[in-house]
Amino acid sequence: MLLGAVIGALLRRLLPDHHLDDHARDIIRLGAGLVGTIAALVLGLLINSANSSYEAQRGEIRQIAANLILLDAVLDQYGPEANPTRVLLREAVGQMIERIWGDPASRNSAGLYGSGTLASKLYAGLHALPTGTPVKSALVAEALQLAVSTSRARLALFEQSRSGLPVPTLIVLIFWLTVLFASYCLFSPVNPTSAVALVLVALSASAALFLIIEMVQPFSGLMHISSLPIRAALPPFAP
């Protein structure tokens, strides 16, 4: 954006006077107003969409933590036969945290589901629990329902953790803002006061873009969603 302001100031010096007459001034100002309106609308929509997605994913993290607490409580109520499954559950939670919040290499180091994964072993352990009484049968059914709900949210979060703002959208938006800054300096001379104002406006617009990029990548960066709710959901297992 500041580069656009510099280009506008250079064009003001290089272009002949008849290229910067009142007619050109009116056309450029009207066009800059249209581009500014479009850029403001896109920025507002992107901020609203990114914030909604950010809050939704933070809510999913809390829901996963609640499901894990309930699942562990159900298995604890089932009895000592479910202790191996509770240990496996804690191992699966650690792997889930690493997959969502870890570096990209660790996220793709192994499959998310299928035979041999901790998730499949956990499901096998739940299905293997005896259901000799109506109470135990109900507890196993509830545990399976909670496990399926947690796995569905886990897979959704894993896919969302690899998403981000589309690069063409970001490029077009920066182009619009650069053109606006060029139009600001095309007809008005730049003095120290206006230069400081341009820097502050550029920082403000850049801060809006920064917030959008941070919120569409909620599992990394400065505004990342904390994994503490999931880490604190299950206490260390004491056999």
Image (cartoon, rainbow, N blue to C red):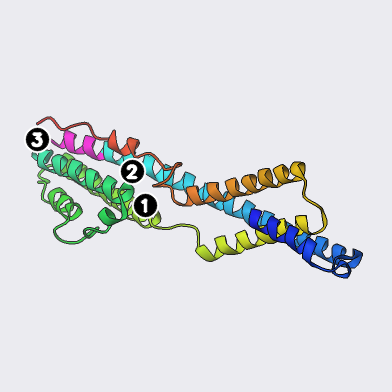
Whether label 1 touches label 2, CB < 8 Å: yes
Q: Which residue is mark 3?
A: 80
Q: Nearer the viewer, residue 63 or 112?
A: 112
Image quadrant assignment for residue 227:
top left
Which quarter shows the C terminus? Answer: top left
Alpha-carbon span between mark 1 and mark 2:
10 Å
Name the element at disc 3: helix
Three-letter amino acid code of the residue under disc 2:
Ile
Side of 8 relative to 238 (left or right) = right
Name the element at disc 1: helix
Q: Position of residue 57 (x, y in %)?
A: 43, 47
Q: Which residue is mark 1?
A: 157
Which quarter shows the N terminus? Answer: bottom right
Q: Nearer the viewer, residue 201 or 4?
A: 4
The kind of secondary structure the magenta stretch mainly shows is helix
Eye-nearest disc, 1 or 2? 1
Q: Tell me which label, 1 or 3, sits earlier in the chain.
A: 3
Asked whether residue 75 is drawn in magenta, I would say yes
Q: Which residue is mark 2?
A: 64
Alpha-carbon span between mark 3 and mark 2:
24 Å
Eye-nearest disc, 3 or 2? 2
Which region shows up in magenta?
A: 71-79
Q: Tell me which label, 3 or 2, sits earlier in the chain.
A: 2
Alpha-carbon span between mark 1 and mark 3:
32 Å
Q: Position of residue 201 (x, y in %)?
A: 68, 46
